[in-house]
Image (spheres, rainbow, N blue to C red):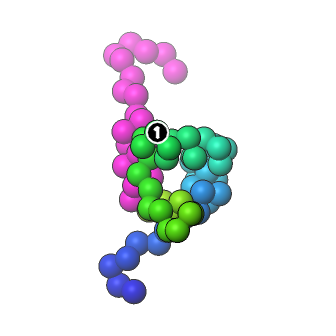
Amino acid sequence: MAGIETLLTVAETAQRLHVSSSMIYALAANRRLAHVRVGTCLRFRESDLAEFVQGQVVAAQPGDVA
């Protein structure tokens, strides 16, 4: 179907973000990570993951050493 973005499972989302599935459930429960509920299952849009990651970026301060 055109216009519908692919939905990722909890496991796929956790793998992409390199975190545990329980972390994904916690982020969704606290409404920090947008999600789609399909029956009792949680699904995640790639665009929402990108937005979440962008919101987590911490800018370096001038003079910070890596």
For numbered disc 1, what is the local secondary structure?
loop
Position of 66 with respect to 11 (left or right) is left
- Seen in the picture, residue 65 relative to 31 is either above or below; the reply is above
Taking the spot 39% from the left edge, 86% from the top edge, the residue there is 1
Counting from the top left corner in percent of width and height, residue 45 is at 44, 62
Q: In which quarter of the image is residue 61?
A: top left
Q: Can residue 21 be seen in this view?
A: yes
Taking the spot 37% from the left edge, 49% from the top edge, the residue there is 51
Position of 44 with respect to 22 (left or right) is left
- Seen in the picture, residue 20 relative to 7 is either above or below; the reply is above
| Residue nearest the viewer, comparing 17 with 42 | 42
Q: What stretch is highlighted in magenta?
A: 47-66
- Seen in the picture, residue 8 relative to 24 is either above or below; the reply is below
Counting from the top left corner in percent of width and height, residue 56 is at 42, 35
Question: In the current view of this chain or complex, which residue is farthest to the bottom?
Answer: 1
Taking the spot 37% from the left edge, 76% from the top edge, the residue there is 4
Mark 1, residue position: 30
Position of 42 with respect to 56 (left or right) is right
Taking the spot 65% from the left edge, 44% from the top edge, the residue there is 22
